[in-house]
Structures are given as C-alpha cells and as structure tokens.
Image (spheres, rainbow, N blue to C red):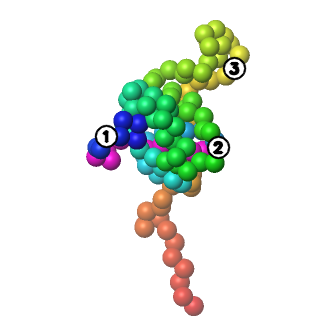
Amino acid sequence: MGCRERAPVTDLLRVVVRDGALVPDLRRRLPGRGASLHPTPECLRAAERRRAFVRALRCSGPVEAGPLRVHVLGAPSAVPPGRGAEAGDGRTTTAPEQTDRHPAGPQSRAGRRRMSKP
C-alpha cells in the first residue's frame, strides 16, 4: 500500500482500524476492512505520507498509527525521551494484545453439542 508494489499476501502485513488506531492483524482474523502493506519502515512512512490508510480503510477522519508504528519500527515514536514506561509513570509502550471476536476461539466438531430433534 505504501510503496505500491505487488507481493504475495503472505509477505504483507494486514492492518485494521480499532478504536481509531491502526492495529497490525498478524493472524489476519480481526473484523472489518483491512489494508495490506510491507512490514518495513519505508513502506509505512510512504503510506503515512500519502495518507493511504484513510483512503484504503475508508475512514471518515484521521487514524492514529501508534500501535502499527511500534510493531513495524520496534519502538514508539510519539513518546518523547524521559516519558512513558521508563520514567515510571505506569504507561506502557507496547502494542495491544490481539484478540479474536470470540475469546474461547473456534470449537472443534467433537467439542460441540448437537441439538437432537424431538
């Protein structure tokens, strides 16, 4: 999306919007419209510069790229030095844990109960 180069889906990182923030969808299971980009800093910067996320994800307003930036770059860029978890104020700078819609996950066929017909 950022560099506009084509690549197999397995080489790309799926991104979705959750609560106004861009979140990496590593398992490709989160609900909603997704966009794909190479998991490289160059591709991320190009997508942000071109405002490609807003267009691709059809958002009505700007989106926060913090969690995606942390995942791709490996370090938060919005927290100034001396702030955040290092300063002891209790804030964390890691990406949120990814969860599926159903916390229990899909059940196997053997684990499901079938309703018997009367």
Report, in whole angstroms, how far the alpha carbon at label 3 lies from the one at label 1.
40 Å
If you read the primary sequence from the N terminus, does the residue marked by circle 1 or circle 2 appear first? 1
Task: Please tell me whether mark 1 sits on a helix, a strand or a loop.
Answer: loop
Q: Secondary structure at mark 3?
A: loop
- The image shows residue 61 at horizontal and vertical percentages of 64, 43
| Left/right of residue 27 with respect to residue 78 in the rendered view | left
Image quadrant where one finds the N terminus: top left
Question: Looking at the rendering, in which quadrant would you find the C terminus?
Answer: bottom right
- The circle drawn on residue 61 is 2
Measured along the vertical axis of the image, is residue 113 above or below residue 40?
below
Task: Sort mark 3 into few (<14), some (14-19) or many (20+) by Cα contacts within 10 Å.
Answer: few
Of 114 and 1, nearer the camera is: 1
Q: Residue at coordinates 43% horizontally, 67% vertically from top-left? A: 109
Real-space Cα separation, disc 1 to disc 2, in angstroms: 26 Å
- Closest to the camera, between mark 3 and mark 1, is 1
Residue 5 image label: 1
- Asked whether residue 43 appears in the rendered view, the answer is yes
Residue bounds of the magenta highlight: 8-18
* Circle 2 Cα neighbour tier, 10 Å, few/some/many (<14 / 14–19 / ≥20): few
Q: Which residue is mark 3?
A: 90
> Residue 39, how many percent across, how many down?
38, 33
